[in-house]
């Protein structure tokens, strides 16, 4: 699994003009599932997302995690994180997991975050989504379960 994690002041995701997920301060997580990813990858990602210390303490150092600041997660599935752009002008997505596999693992990751006590909102899997965010920092971190 691959994730682009952005620290945000707020973020939302809409489908057909309807807001389907919205958070205040926390993390916008764009999550891609690759061929061969398993439950173990979802567990790895949920643990890293919940516990990554990318929020500033009173001294401005990255010492605080989501739970320390009462932050939420907006989790948005994004298969394009597995784009292969090495050849040609059009990306290939052969490394992305099939939708039926990816949906299960994205939902599992969201569920594991909730079990860890994180407030989680999600996009709508497979839909054309419009994501809005106000970066905080900006702070952007890349994660890969492999």
Image (cartoon, rainbow, N blue to C red):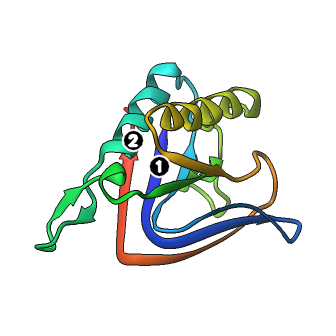
The answer, for residue 77, to whether it is visible in the render is: no
Would residue 54 be found to the left or right of residue 47 on screen?
left
Would residue 143 be found to the left or right of residue 54 on screen?
right
Q: Residue at x 29, y 48 (%)?
A: 52
Q: Residue at x 76, y 50 (%)?
A: 124
Would residue 78 be found to the left or right of residue 18 on screen?
left
Q: Which residue is mark 2?
A: 144
The answer, for residue 138, to whether it is visible in the render is: yes
Q: Residue at x 46, y 68 (%)?
A: 25
Q: Position of residue 109 (x, y in %)?
A: 54, 34
Q: Label 2 crowding class (10 Å Cα cut-off): few <14, some 14-19, many 20+?
A: some
Residue 142 sits above or below residue 35 on the image: below
Q: Label 1 crowding class (10 Å Cα cut-off): few <14, some 14-19, many 20+?
A: many
Q: Nearer the viewer, residue 104 or 24?
A: 24
Q: Position of residue 142 (x, y in %)?
A: 37, 54
Marks 2/1: CA distance? 6 Å
Secondary element under disc 1, as helix, strand or loop, is strand
Q: Position of residue 99 (x, y in %)?
A: 74, 34
Q: Residue at x 31, y 43 (%)?
A: 51
Residue occupying the far left of the picture: 59
Would residue 111 be found to the left or right of residue 6 on screen?
right
Residue occupying the far right of the picture: 16
Residue 66 sits above or below residue 8 on the image: above
Labels 2 & 1 near each other (Cβ < 8 A): yes
The image quadrant where one finds the C terminus is top left
Secondary element under disc 2, as helix, strand or loop, is strand
Q: Which residue is mark 1?
A: 3
Counting residues from the N terminus, which is met first, the one under dot 2 or under dot 1? 1
Q: Nearer the viewer, residue 9 or 124?
A: 9
């Amino acid at each position: 699994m691959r994730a682009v994690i952005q620290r945000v002041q707020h973020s939302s995701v809409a489908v057909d003009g309807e807001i389907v997920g919205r958070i205040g301060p926390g993390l916008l997580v764009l999550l891609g599932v690759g061929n061969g990813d398993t439950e173990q990858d979802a567990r790895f990602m949920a643990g890293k997302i919940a516990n990554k210390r990318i929020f500033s303490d009173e001294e401005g150092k990255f010492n605080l995690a989501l739970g320390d600041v009462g932050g939420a997660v907006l989790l948005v599935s994004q298969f394009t994180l597995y784009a292969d752009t090495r050849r040609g002008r059009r990306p290939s997505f052969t490394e992305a997991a099939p939708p039926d596999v990816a949906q299960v693992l994205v939902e599992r990751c969201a569920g594991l975050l909730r079990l860890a006590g994180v407030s989680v909102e999600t996009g709508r899997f497979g839909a054309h989504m419009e994501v809005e965010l106000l970066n905080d920092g900006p702070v952007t971190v890349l994660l890969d379960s492999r």
